[in-house]
Amino acid sequence: MCLRDTSRITTNNKERMTTKNSLVFVSLFVAICGIFLFVGIRGVYADSSTISVSVTDGEAFHEEAIVYTAGGTASLTNTNSTTVSATIPANFYTENLRVQLTSYANDYFVSTKPEPFGVDFIGKAYDFTLRKTNGTVVSDTILQPISFTLSYTSSEVSGYTESSLAPYHYNDSTSAWDAISSFTLDTSAKTVTFSASSFSSFAIFGTPTPAASNTTTTTGGGGGGGVVAPPTEVFFYGFAYPESTVLLLKNAQVVSSTRAKADASFQFSLTGITPGTHTFGVVGEDASGHRSVTQSFTVKLTSAITTTLTGIVVPPTVMADKTDVRKGDTVKIEGKAQPGATVALYLGDTGNKIKKILAHVSANTAGSWSYMLPTVALALGGYDIQALAEKGENKTGLSQSVSFTVGLENKVATLFAKAPTHVDFNKDNKVNLIDFSIAAFWFKKESPPAHVDTNGDGKVDLVDFSILAYYWTG
């Protein structure tokens, strides 16, 4: 960043700056630039991974702060107090990046990037860009999607059906706006939240409210009644693996299960839920019993309102056929994903938070994928592998890790066995600190839930922790 002198110095033949004064001016100018450059450099390499800047209509760039691989947040506040915030997860990329948020007036893109038929721009439009610390735009795939929350005002949605609001992403290849299928609309907070792994222009669009019609509905006779409020409902639509078991969790407890169709699609519906903020999760379980990591999302439910969540994609399962592999031999990495998805595999040393792309493979019509990993180029030691799947606009987060060690002999991985359900409180096929924390919450409290009371004696005490320790998987 450098201070640019935009002032104009007018001169005439009678009044000219002497050479000495010019040199003094230039010296002062260079010194001031040096001070601002030093401040700018300190800003670029500031320790904070959170930035927050107020901007005016038009555009404002955010290149003065770095978001580290440990993650962080970035936010922008417009003059009308609407905001956009980005939540960047840990290990989202293999190096520190610069986040650039740009805000535009409502009609900025009307001629260059016109709205889709039947909908209008709602509130501000934005450009989101990721750059490396040297300024280069990141063009390859990031490891974890970034969550964005865009807000709007009551006046901006006046004349539009608020429930129709949806985020869109501008597709530079087709020169058209594509609807983002998975998002959360919170009409109480007046926010739209979604995740993205590729970056361009983003905006909220809404459908104009149709003119009211004079229609009268007549009901049958009967005793004095009243208007019955509709129930509070939530519908879930997404993809897992073909013919797989899919579990729905609400606040860390399994509340429903279903079987995915041959195309891996699934759906759930919950009715009569208490209004308020709930955390839901979806877990996929393949035919071998391997489960995915939990795809979680937090939703604020409003009384008598139906909320629909679409575009949920369960992360792939991943497993290795060996826990130890002799250097020079191969280890088979395989799992399940949505049919036709491209699965990216990431390899790193055990404990290394940053993994590098190992390979890309395709899931077949049954959702199965595999990769034979040669170890001849790997050094002796432990390694972790994770996977994510991408199909069209749908992209998952990273899978759980699978580990193996390159050494002097081969050791076949033992057959998978599920963790006993009476100690696996969050149903992730593991007995670890998460289950311990759940039990600790209910320790010596009255009337603990039956699924936390491991021995069924109506209380959670040291006996239950001993049972947890016996089945501990880590």
Image: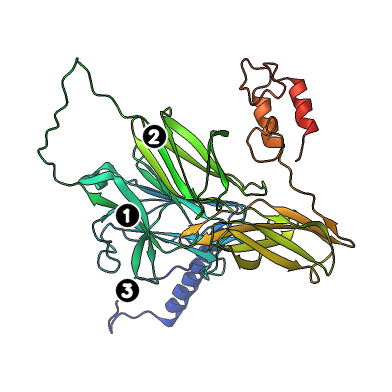
Secondary structure at badge 1 equals strand
Q: Position of residue 328 (x, y in %)?
A: 83, 70
For the residues labelled 2 and 3, the Cα–Cα distance comes to 64 Å
Residue 105 placement: quadrant: bottom left
Give the mark nearer the N terminus: 1 vs 3: 3
Mark 2 residue type: Glu
Residue at image mark 3? 8
Residue at 65 percent across and 29 percent down: it is 438
Residue at image mark 1? 124
Residue 125 placement: quadrant: bottom left
Q: Is residue 415 left or right of residue 125?
A: right
Give the mark nearer the N terminus: 2 vs 3: 3
Near mark 1 (Cα within 10 A), the count class, few <14, some 14-19 or many ≥20, is many
Q: Are marks 1 and 3 in contact (CB under 8 Å)?
A: no
Near mark 2 (Cα within 10 A), the count class, few <14, some 14-19 or many ≥20, is many
In which quadrant of the rendered image does the C terminus lie?
A: top right
State which mark lies toward you, 2 or 3.
2
Q: Position of residue 87 (x, y in %)?
A: 51, 50
State which mark lies toward you, 2 or 1.
2
State which mark lies toward you, 1 or 3.
1
